[in-house]
Image (spheres, rainbow, N blue to C red):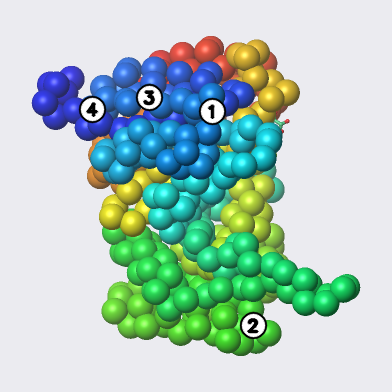
Amino acid sequence: AASGSDLIRATLFPGDGIGPEIAESVKQVFKAADVPIEWEEHYVGQEVDPRTQSFLTWESLESVRRNKVGLKGPMATPIGKGHRSLNLTLRKELNLYANVRPCYSLPGYKTRYDDVNLITIRENTEGEYSGLEHQVVRGVVESLKIITRQASLRVAEYAFHYAKTHGRDRVSAIHKANIMQKTDGLFLKCCREVAEKYPEIKYEEVVIDNCCMMLVKNPALFDVLVMPNLYGDIISDLCAGLIGGLGLTPSCNIGEGGIALAEAVHGSAPDIAGKNLANPTALTLSAVTMLRHLELHDKADRIQNAILNTIAEGKYRTADLGGSSSTTDFTKAIIDHL
Ligand code: ATP
Ligand code: MG
C-alpha cells in the first residue's frame, strides 16, 4: 500500500442520477487495487455561484486546477434561466480542448466486430460549437464554424503525442475539406505540419463520409483518429456503438496546463437511478484513462483486466449487458478478479 506521502490527490465529481452509485464502485475498486489516489469529492451546488455563473462552484473548479486530474460522473444541468450548463462551464473554465475516447472490443461481450481498437480525439473548443448563430434576414440563418490555427495545432499535437506515447503507429485526420475548403483545409494543414515532426507515425487524411463507411465495414482499419468538433461528436458515438454502447465507453478530457478530466460518455440515466442497476464499467474505465494519464500503467492494466475478465466470464453482468446483477454485485465481482 502507498504511504500517505505518495498519495496523488484527484478531484471526484460523483454527479447526478446514477453518478453516486457508479462513483462508489470506482472508489471501491481503486481501494481494493491499492491505487495511490486520494479523492477530493465535490458536488454540484444547490444554487448558481456568481463566480462561475453555474451550479459548479469556484472551489470545485479550483480543485481540478490544483490537482490537475479528476473524474466526473454524469451531471444533469438543472433547468432554469440565467446560468451556464455544467459541461460548458467545465469545458470553458478548464479549457478542455481535446476529448479522447478509447474504443476497443470487450472480449466475451459479443458485438458485430471483435477487433475494434481505436482512439478518437475530438477538438473540443471551436468548430461548429462556437455558438455563433444569427438570422441574416427572415427565413435565412447563419451559423459560424470557427477553425483556428492555434486550436488545430494543439489538438493535432496532442493526437500525435498520444500515438507516440501509447505505441500506436497511425493517425488519421478526418475532414470534409473538399467542401469546407477554408475551415477543414486549415485543420488539415495544421495536422500535416505536426505530422512532419513525427516521421515514425504514419499520417493519412480520410473524408468523413468515407470514414463512416469504413468504420462500419471494418473498424480495424483505424488506429488514432483526430477531427474537428462536430465530426468528433458523431464519430465517437458511432465508435461507441461498435463495441456495445453507452454503459461501456470511457472518455477523458484534456485541458490546458496538463489537466485531465475523465468522464463516462453516458448521461445520468434517471430511469434507473437509485435502483442499484447501473453499469459502472464506463466510469471505471474512464478512471483507468486517468491512471494512464498519471502513468500508473500497472494499476490501470490490473483494473482494466479485472473488468474485462468479469464481463468475459459472463457470470455477473448488469441488465444493460443482458445480465441480472446489481451494481454492487458486479463491483464485487470486479474486485474478486483484481
Ligand atoms: P441525461 O439527460 O443525463 O443524458 P438521459 O435520459 O439521456 O440522461 P442517458 O444517461 O443518456 O439518459 O441514458 C440513455 C439510456 O441508457 C437510459 O435508458 C439509461 O438507463 C441507459 N444507460 C446509460 N448509462 C447507463 C449505465 N451506466 N448503465 C446502465 N444503463 C445505462
Ligand atoms: Mg443523454
Image mark count: 4
Q: Residues within 10 Å of mark 3 (few under 14, many from 20)?
A: some
What residue is at 68 percent from the left and 85 percent from the top?
A: 179
The first of marks 1 and 2 along the sequence is 1
Say what secondary structure mark 3 lies in: strand
Give the labeled residue for mark 4: 36
Q: Residue at x 46, y 25 (%)?
A: 43
Q: What's the mark number on residue 41?
A: 3
- Dot 1 and dot 2 residues touching (CB under 8 Å): no
Mark closer to the chain start, 4 or 2: 4
Amino acid beneath label 4: Pro
Identify whether 326 is placed above or below 40: above
The span from disc 4 to disc 1 (Cα, nearest Å) is 33 Å
Q: Quadrant of residue 139?
A: bottom right
Cα–Cα gap, marks 1 and 2? 42 Å
Q: Which residue is mark 1?
A: 47
- Which label lies toward us, 2 or 3? 3
Q: CA distance from mark 4 to mark 2?
A: 47 Å
Q: Quadrant of residue 131?
A: bottom right
- The mark closer to the camera, 4 or 1, is 1
Q: CA distance from mark 2 to mark 3?
A: 44 Å
The residues bearing labels 4 and 3 have C-alpha atoms spaced at a distance of 16 Å
Identify the disc placed on residue 180: 2
Instruction: Give amino acid for label 3.
Output: Glu
Name the spot of residue 91 as percent of width and height, x first: 47, 50
The local secondary structure at tag 1 comes to loop
Q: Are marks 1 and 3 in contact (CB under 8 Å)?
A: no
Q: Secondary structure at mark 4?
A: loop
Residue 22 sits above or below residue 197 on the image: above
Label 2 amino acid?
Answer: Met
